[in-house]
Image: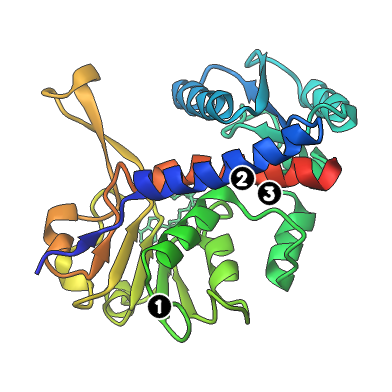
Amino acid sequence: MAANLIDGRAIAEEIHRETAARVAALAARGATPGLAFVRVGDDPASKVYVGMKERACQRLGIRSTTLILAESTSEAEVLALIGRLNADPAVHGILVQAPLPRAICSARVFASVAPGKDVDGFHPVNVGKLMLGDPGGFVPCTPAGIHQLLIRAGVPLAGAEVVILGRGNIVGKPMAAILIQKAPDADATVTVCHSRTRDLAAHCRRADILIAAMGVREFVRADMVKPGAAVIDVGVNRVPDPAAKGGSRLVGDVDFEGVRAVAGHLTPNPGGVGPMTIAMLMRNTVQAAEMQS
Ligand code: NAP
């Protein structure tokens, strides 16, 4: 039987509706949430991502500003700009779009954003709050979105065997931190795999929930999936395709057609995790505005 597809676009719309109601409640108190994007250099994917996030802000009544800096901008200049945004009361959230140019230390830049405005959840204070289970911090948008996909698709989490492929700071590690919490909608048993994991396929085969966040095209094949498992495909990989517009297309970390025949739930890619990342960014921004207003 084919897997139920988890419709990330529909669930993201549901979250946008909830966020829009919170924006309206803030407006009734005379407050408008404000989000500042900082983009350094000319990375084409960054332009696309920031553009999508700006459009989401516009739709929801969040005031957004995008500060575009040249590739040659020094780290000191970026830090000075963030300092000004930290002090600006009309800016409730700050998002520094990755990747930054090589000459700039991303960790220092992320740590310079005021924790209360860090809607990406990358500041060490927010990383710490997530580990501690403190609900007063910001949770990184992609794993927070995956969590919502699992909850709203009705996938049981308490006691579930979760295997996460990838230990990156943006997806894998915070995803594990969310699901191991002693809390409702968590309480899972989590294994995090990476490039040094022995017999990775054996780990995958015992997962009730398999989350692929490696950036390796179609790595997860049907024979690595336990029948009935929920499979979340986070990867974004651009592959050449002469038939596609622009000569390339995006594929995930999961062999969609093969895994669909075995899994119980599966996210399409695109149309699964991607829209949720933006929905959670909007939600975090409104949370920041509520906390500051
Ligand atoms: P990352 O920081 O580069 O982490 C990749 C992880 O995958 C690393 O832990 C790496 O292991 C592991 N890995 C790579 N190849 C492997 C292999 N052959 N076998 C086992 N493990 C392997 O990446 P990220 O930022 O977490 O992103 C992961 C993917 O998610 C990317 O494709 C990215 O584009 C996508 N993504 C999507 C969204 C969205 O909104 N849809 C958002 C964020 C990221 P080591 O640690 O041992 O090197």
Is residue 274 rendered to the left or right of residue 29? Answer: left
Please tell me which residue lies in front, 9 or 235.
Answer: 9
Q: Which residue is pictured at 42% across the width and 62% down the height?
A: 152
CA distance separating discs 3 and 2: 16 Å
Q: Which of marks 2 and 3 precedes in the sequence?
A: 3
Q: Secondary structure at mark 2?
A: helix
Q: Percent position (x, y) of residue 129?
A: 75, 64
Q: Tag 1: Cα neighbours inside 10 Å, few (<14), some, or many (≥20)?
A: some
Residue of label 2: 283
**Foreground label between 1 and 3:** 1
Can see residue 194? Answer: no
Residue 270: image x %, image y %?
30, 41
Image position, residue 261 (x, y; %): 11, 65
- Residue corresponding to mark 1: 156
Per the model, the C-alpha gap separating discs 1 and 3 is 28 Å
Residue type, label 2: Arg
User: Is residue 29 shown left or right of residue 3?
Assistant: right
Instruction: Return the x and y of residue 53 as percentages of the image width and height.
Output: 53, 29
Q: Amino acid at mark 3?
A: Phe
The answer to whether one can see residue 156 in this image is yes
Which residue in the structure is indicated by mark 3? 122
